[in-house]
Image (cartoon, rainbow, N blue to C red):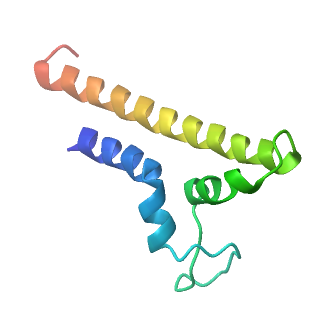
Amino acid sequence: MFAATVLGFGRAIGETMIVLMASGNATIVSWSLADSTRTMTATIAAELAETVVGGHHYRMLFMIGALLFVVTFISNLVGDVVIHRLKGKLEGKR
Protein backbone atom coordinates (compact mmCIF):
# COMPACT_ATOMS: atom_id res chain seq x y z
CA MET A 1 0.00 0.00 0.00
CA PHE A 2 2.81 2.39 0.83
CA ALA A 3 4.60 1.68 -2.46
CA ALA A 4 1.39 2.33 -4.37
CA THR A 5 0.97 5.63 -2.54
CA VAL A 6 4.53 6.74 -3.32
CA LEU A 7 4.22 5.73 -6.98
CA GLY A 8 0.85 7.47 -7.20
CA PHE A 9 2.38 10.62 -5.74
CA GLY A 10 5.17 10.55 -8.32
CA ARG A 11 2.70 9.99 -11.13
CA ALA A 12 0.47 12.83 -9.92
CA ILE A 13 3.40 15.23 -10.12
CA GLY A 14 4.07 14.21 -13.71
CA GLU A 15 0.52 14.50 -15.03
CA THR A 16 0.96 17.94 -16.49
CA MET A 17 -1.76 18.59 -19.01
CA ILE A 18 -4.73 17.35 -16.99
CA VAL A 19 -3.55 19.43 -14.05
CA LEU A 20 -3.16 22.41 -16.35
CA MET A 21 -6.78 22.12 -17.46
CA ALA A 22 -8.31 21.12 -14.12
CA SER A 23 -6.62 23.73 -11.94
CA GLY A 24 -7.90 26.72 -13.85
CA ASN A 25 -4.47 27.76 -15.14
CA ALA A 26 -4.32 30.98 -13.12
CA THR A 27 -0.93 32.63 -12.83
CA ILE A 28 -1.83 34.74 -9.79
CA VAL A 29 -1.26 33.17 -6.38
CA SER A 30 -4.11 33.62 -3.91
CA TRP A 31 -4.51 32.68 -0.25
CA SER A 32 -7.99 31.31 -0.89
CA LEU A 33 -8.19 27.56 -1.45
CA ALA A 34 -11.25 28.05 -3.65
CA ASP A 35 -9.41 30.19 -6.23
CA SER A 36 -7.79 28.80 -9.36
CA THR A 37 -4.11 28.01 -9.22
CA ARG A 38 -1.26 26.73 -11.37
CA THR A 39 1.12 23.93 -10.42
CA MET A 40 4.82 23.93 -11.22
CA THR A 41 4.46 21.31 -13.96
CA ALA A 42 1.68 23.30 -15.57
CA THR A 43 3.84 26.44 -15.42
CA ILE A 44 6.62 24.69 -17.31
CA ALA A 45 4.22 23.36 -19.94
CA ALA A 46 2.45 26.67 -20.45
CA GLU A 47 5.42 29.04 -20.49
CA LEU A 48 8.41 27.18 -21.96
CA ALA A 49 7.41 27.68 -25.60
CA GLU A 50 7.09 31.46 -25.16
CA THR A 51 10.36 32.25 -23.40
CA VAL A 52 13.62 33.49 -24.90
CA VAL A 53 16.09 30.62 -25.08
CA GLY A 54 18.90 31.24 -22.60
CA GLY A 55 17.08 34.06 -20.80
CA HIS A 56 16.38 34.32 -17.09
CA HIS A 57 12.81 33.07 -17.43
CA TYR A 58 14.01 30.07 -19.47
CA ARG A 59 16.58 29.18 -16.83
CA MET A 60 14.04 29.53 -14.02
CA LEU A 61 11.69 27.12 -15.77
CA PHE A 62 14.50 24.59 -15.99
CA MET A 63 15.27 25.18 -12.32
CA ILE A 64 11.63 24.39 -11.52
CA GLY A 65 11.99 21.17 -13.53
CA ALA A 66 15.14 20.25 -11.60
CA LEU A 67 13.38 20.99 -8.32
CA LEU A 68 10.49 18.72 -9.31
CA PHE A 69 12.98 15.99 -10.21
CA VAL A 70 14.68 16.28 -6.81
CA VAL A 71 11.34 16.16 -4.94
CA THR A 72 10.23 13.10 -6.93
CA PHE A 73 13.59 11.38 -6.45
CA ILE A 74 13.60 11.99 -2.69
CA SER A 75 10.02 10.80 -2.27
CA ASN A 76 10.80 7.62 -4.22
CA LEU A 77 14.00 7.10 -2.23
CA VAL A 78 12.18 7.50 1.10
CA GLY A 79 9.47 5.11 -0.07
CA ASP A 80 12.07 2.53 -1.12
CA VAL A 81 13.90 2.74 2.21
CA VAL A 82 10.66 2.37 4.19
CA ILE A 83 9.53 -0.58 2.08
CA HIS A 84 12.85 -2.39 2.49
CA ARG A 85 12.78 -1.85 6.26
CA LEU A 86 9.21 -3.12 6.52
CA LYS A 87 10.06 -6.08 4.32
CA GLY A 88 13.05 -6.91 6.52
CA LYS A 89 10.94 -6.75 9.68
CA LEU A 90 8.17 -8.89 8.19
CA GLU A 91 10.66 -11.52 6.99
CA GLY A 92 12.35 -11.58 10.40
CA LYS A 93 15.75 -10.35 9.28
CA ARG A 94 15.88 -7.52 11.81
Task: Identify the image quadrant of residue 55.
Answer: top right
| As drawn, 2 above or below 32 | above
Q: Residue furthest right?
A: 55
Percent of width and height locating residue 93: 18, 13
Residue placed most toward the observer, 46 or 2: 46
Residue placed most toward the observer, 47 or 83: 47
Drawn side of residue 15 relative to residue 93, left or right = right
Q: Which residue is drawn at 67% across and 80% down?
A: 30
| As drawn, 21 above or below 84 | below
Q: Residue at x 46, y 50 (%)?
A: 13
Q: Which residue is drawn at 49% across and 39% down?
A: 72
The quadrant the N terminus occupies is: top left
Task: Identify the image quadrant of residue 4.
Answer: top left
Q: Residue furthest left?
A: 91
Percent of width and height locating residue 28: 71, 76
The quadrant the C terminus occupies is: top left
Q: Which residue is drawn at 57% across and 59% down?
A: 42
Drawn side of residue 42 relative to residue 31, left or right = left
Drawn side of residue 29 relative to residue 8, left or right = right
Q: How many tags in the picture?
A: 0
| As drawn, 87 above or below 40 | above
